Each structure stands twice: as C-alpha cells, then as structure tokens.
C-alpha cells in the first residue's frame, strides 16, 4: 500500500507521507498549509464557505470542479491540483477578474468569504 500523497497546491508540488485518512482538506489547508481564506461554516458540506477547486485528470485533460473542503479527505487529492482563494492573486498584485468585478460592481460583504 502506498503511503505517499502527491498533488499541486496552486502551482507548487506537495508531497505528504503517512497522512491520517480522516484528515479533511479544510483541516489541512488551515492547520498545515496556513491557507486561511477557506473557511469552515457548517462543517457538513452545505453552506459553501469551504469551497475550493480541484483539477483531476480525466481522459487526458484536467477537469476542474468545486468541492466542499470540509467533507473531502486529503487522501483523495493524489494526482490532483488544489486551488484556493489565495491562488486568485497575481504575482504583481493585480486583482483577479472575479475580484475586479466585485470592486467594479460595488459589491460588499463582511469579508468572511469575499475572494
């Protein structure tokens, strides 16, 4: 049985060994990777505060989809790419189109889940 997990966090390769099979993506992001943009709301996969994007290989291409990080186990990310709200930032500080649209539309929220 393989004990090593390999995936991309953003564009950086990550390799973990002997990972706890009950460790969720949300727990790992917040406690290990220190990515605090992904929030815990309901801890049941209903509210969407913990939404992240994963890219999985499928038919020779990458398939991107949103998942609930609070109910997805880390062990299922082997060979995937994991994208969080922190990956929206550009190296030069330029806003991502989603962030720019929020500003241009005078969108406001409390900041808890705004990208």
Image (spheres, grey):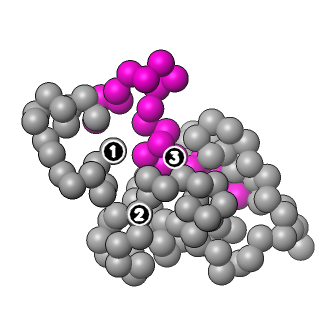
In what element is the residue under mark 3?
A: strand
The magenta segment is 78-98
Looking at this rendering, what residue extends furthest in the right direction?
Answer: 1
> Percent x, y for residue 102?
19, 37
Left or right of residue 39, residue 14 in this image = right
Q: Determine the residue positioned at 27% across, 52% down.
A: 111
Looking at this rendering, what residue extends furthest in the left direction?
Answer: 106
> Percent x, y for residue 13?
73, 42
Foreground pick, 13 / 91? 91
Foreground pick, 40 / 75? 40
Q: For mark 1, what is the residue?
A: 115
Q: Is residue 18 visible?
A: yes
Q: Residues within 10 Å of mark 1 (few under 14, many from 20)?
A: some
Name above or below for residue 109 compared with residue 5: above
Tell whether position 91 is magenta.
yes
Q: What quarter of the picture does the N terminus occupy?
A: bottom right
Tell whether position 74 is magenta.
no
Name above or below for residue 10 compared with residue 23: above
Q: For mark 2, what is the residue?
A: 39
For residue 83, which numbered disc appears in the image?
3
Name above or below for residue 109 compared with residue 98: below
Which badge, 2 or 1, comes first in the chain's sequence? 2
Q: Residues within 10 Å of mark 2 (few under 14, many from 20)?
A: many
Q: What quarter of the picture does the C terminus occupy?
A: top left
Circle 1 or circle 3, nearest the eye: 1
Q: Determine the residue positioned at 35% across, 29% down.
A: 96
Circle 3 or circle 2, nearest the eye: 2
């Amino acid at each position: 049985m393989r004990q090593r997990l390999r995936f991309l966090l953003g564009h950086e390769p990550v390799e973990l060994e002997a990972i706890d099979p009950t460790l969720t993506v949300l727990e790992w992001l917040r406690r290990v990777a220190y990515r605090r943009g992904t929030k815990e709301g309901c801890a049941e996969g209903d509210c969407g505060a913990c939404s992240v994007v994963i890219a999985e290989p499928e038919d020779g291409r990458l398939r991107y989809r949103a998942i609930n990080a609070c109910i997805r186990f880390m062990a299922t990310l082997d060979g995937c790419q994991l994208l969080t709200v922190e990956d929206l930032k550009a190296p030069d500080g330029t806003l991502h189109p989603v962030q720019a649209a929020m500003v241009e539309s005078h969108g406001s929220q409390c900041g808890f889940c705004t990208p």
